[in-house]
Amino acid sequence: MWKRSSGPASAVIVAVALTTPGWALTITDVLPGTFVDISVGGVGTPLGLDLDQVVEIVTTIGNPVFPAGAVAVGNNGGIGFQAGTNELILTDVNEPIPSDDAFGGDQALLAFWDDIGNEVGDIYWTELVVPSSANRPAGEALIVQWEEKRFDQLGPGPDDTATFQIQVFQDPGPDDIFAQLLYTDIEQERPGGGKSATIGYQDGAAGFNDFQWSFDTEGAVSNGTVLSLIPEPMTGLLLVAGAALLRRRGRMV
């Protein structure tokens, strides 16, 4: 049961809100999202990546977690931020987060870090307005989509493909959804919903925390899964409470 408090307890909350350089981040699969297919109609720009290639793009989209500017797109299933200063590398052998083999250990979103290398399929990117969901308003987003990509080390199901995308939002909305990882075709035998992939958020030196959703875990994601990067609930409550106390003190001065 919540009780009204003042004095030292409120001071601690204000101190947390004022001094914490970043807040704790988590990934959840309970918030809705909308997969926007940018591979058709000339909406997205194809990057033509193969094997372990990485290319730099420049985005105007940014939010409190992800800066606008240079972004590295890796064929092997992830994007790295502040690409002008990090290593343009995403290897064909995935590792647990954090890993120097993922953009030199710098900040990254790893939607499906795996050995994606075959020339079948393509990767597209664009910036556009994403429709609203129950927890986020319509607004501009950076979208990077891996469309029907095959795998370099084929193994079972040599013709199997995967389709998924990353969305980074300019306006995270009231629930602070900074980014989403969305999957439409990830259950074929070779991808196996993540049985040889790393999925999660790597913080680098951004000031938050790493969060690994899965590592080499079959069925970690399925067709229709939406993973949302948000603040941990208690951290969000502390920040909101601190901001409210600061506003209250401002009115009392």
Image: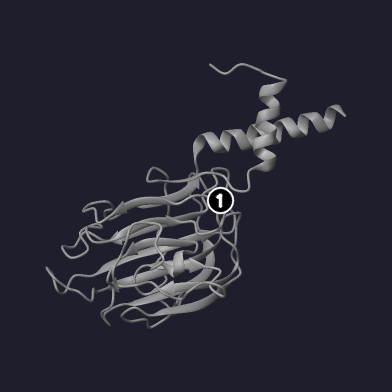
Q: Nearer the viewer, residue 214 or 193?
A: 214
Where is residue 70 shown, x and y percent of the image? 56, 73
Residue at the far right: name it. Answer: 253
Query: From the viewer's perspective, is 118 left or right of 180?
Result: left
Q: Residue at x 44, y 50 (%)?
A: 228
Question: What is the count of numbered marks?
Answer: 1
Tell me the kind of residue under disc 1. Pro
Q: Residue at x 41, y 74 (%)?
A: 89
Q: Residue at x 13, y 69 (%)?
A: 157
* Mark 1 secondary-structure assignment: loop
Query: From the viewer's perspective, is 214 left or right of 85?
Result: left
- Quarter of image, res 100: bottom left
Q: Nearer the viewer, residue 82 or 111?
A: 82
Query: From the viewer's perspective, is 31 left or right of 118?
Result: right
* Display colour scheme: one colour
Residue at the far front: name it. Answer: 100
Where is residue 152 shown, x and y percent of the image? 23, 76
Where is residue 13 shown, x and y percent of the image? 65, 31
- Quarter of image, res 4: top right
The residue under label 1 is: 137
Quarter of the figure that contains the C terminus: top right
How crowded is the residue under tag 1: few (<14 C-alpha within 10 Å), some, or many (20+)? some
Where is residue 90 shown, x and y percent of the image? 38, 72
Residue at the far left: name it. Answer: 156
